[in-house]
Image: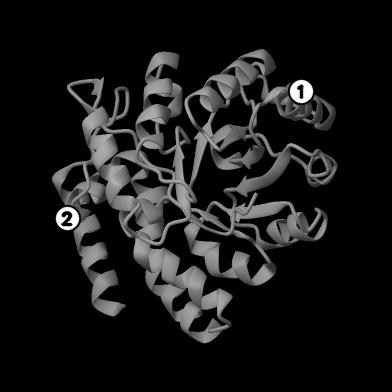
């Protein structure tokens, strides 16, 4: 599976507490007018733990109807149990997902040993009707899929790649070096996107690309063309907004950025709260500064 390119892990729009499928579809249609490689639904930025199974299936089906052939639809299916993850992966495939993204289990984090995680992902990959991507998000879960486990899992015929959301370039580089050439490591942190690509990452699953997709695709294309000096400058321009949307304001800030950019961010689902007017203005100014510089 060719995972080279930029994927936005899109937010799920809600209105009045309910899934806004119309807004989701319209957003997807607009994203597909850009150079994005595809779309990721039901990731961390999609507020996946806050949706029930029926809503999750509707999100995948709605996006699938707007993602054309040749572009990839990846669905997050992580559950705390292996059996629950297998069931979610099976439903996602039936709804049209091309691949599934599986975050590490975290509730019993002290018991998530290398062997436990390896067995979990092997069982999911054995049963999943579509290819599986591993997903490390240590800042959120407190669990890290160890390098040795990734190296072993990367040889499974149905495990095709990994999203690494950390910013440790040495670890990202080791993931690339210790896995087969047909295993795709995808950066999950926009501030280290350039560095990850230079190390050999296949692309990125970047929250920033939800709000400003074209500059993220441009950076990918620059590195692919060997225009490294230009790409490094663009990375410096992208980083302030990326940090604002992820480290500072999180999902509610990303949804505000979508509204500013003309998409529908919608309301965060409680217990998440929307950002206030000062944060909205801060995000607006950062977006304006980015586009004024590119």
Q: Residues within 10 Å of mark 2 (few under 14, many from 20)?
A: some
The C terminus, quarter of image = bottom left
Q: Which mark is residue 123?
A: 1
The percent coordinates of residue 283 (x first, y second) are 24, 56
Identify whether 132 is placed above or below 81. Answer: below
Q: Nearer the viewer, mark 1 or mark 2?
A: 1
Looking at marks 1 and 2 on the same chain, the residue that comes earlier in the sequence is marked by 1
* Rendering quarter of residue 159: top right
At a point 35% along the width and 31% down the height, the residue shown is 62
* Rendering quarter of residue 2: bottom right
Task: Kindly report the distance in space between the C-alpha atoms of the residues bearing marks 1 and 2.
Answer: 46 Å
Identify whether 179 is placed above or below 226. Answer: above
The percent coordinates of residue 200 (x first, y second) are 68, 66
Q: Residues within 10 Å of mark 1 (few under 14, many from 20)?
A: some
Residue 167 placement, left or right of 22: right
Per the image, the residue denoted by label 2 is 281
Residue 253 in view, yes or no: no
Q: Provide the secondary structure element on which disc 1 rests.
A: helix
Residue 215 placement, left or right of 196: left
Identify whether 63 is placed above or below 199. Answer: above
């Amino acid at each position: 599976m060719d995972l080279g390119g930029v994927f936005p892990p899109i937010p799920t729009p809600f209105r009045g507490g309910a899934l806004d499928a119309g807004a989701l579809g319209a957003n997807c249609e607009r994203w597909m007018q850009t150079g994005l490689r595809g779309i990721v639904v039901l990731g961390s930025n999609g507020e996946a733990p806050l949706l029930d199974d029926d809503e999750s299936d509707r999100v995948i089906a709605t996006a699938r109807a707007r993602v054309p052939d040749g572009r990839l639809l990846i669905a997050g299916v992580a559950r705390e149990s292996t059996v629950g993850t297998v069931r979610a992966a099976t439903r996602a495939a039936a709804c049209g997902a091309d691949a599934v993204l599986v975050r590490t289990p975290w509730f019993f984090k002290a018991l998530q040993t290398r062997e436990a995680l390896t067995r979990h992902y092997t069982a999911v990959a054995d049963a999943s009707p579509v290819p599986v991507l591993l997903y490390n998000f240590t800042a959120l879960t407190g669990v890290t899929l160890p390098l040795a486990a990734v190296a072993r899992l990367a040889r499974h015929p149905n495990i095709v790649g990994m999203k690494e959301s950390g910013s440790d370039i040495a670890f990202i580089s080791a993931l690339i070096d210790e896995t087969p050439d047909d295993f795709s490591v995808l950066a999950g942190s926009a501030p280290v996107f350039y560095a990850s690509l230079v190390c050999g990452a296949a692309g990125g699953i970047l929250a920033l690309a939800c709000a400003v997709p074209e500059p993220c695709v441009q950076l990918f294309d620059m590195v692919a063309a060997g225009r490294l000096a230009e790409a490094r400058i663009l990375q410096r321009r992208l980083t302030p907004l990326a940090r604002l949307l992820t480290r500072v304001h999180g999902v509610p800030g990303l949804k505000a950025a979508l509204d500013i950019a003309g998409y529908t961010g919608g309301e965060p689902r409680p217990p998440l709260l929307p950002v206030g007017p000062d944060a909205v203005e801060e995000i607006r100014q950062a977006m304006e500064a980015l586009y004024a510089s590119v």
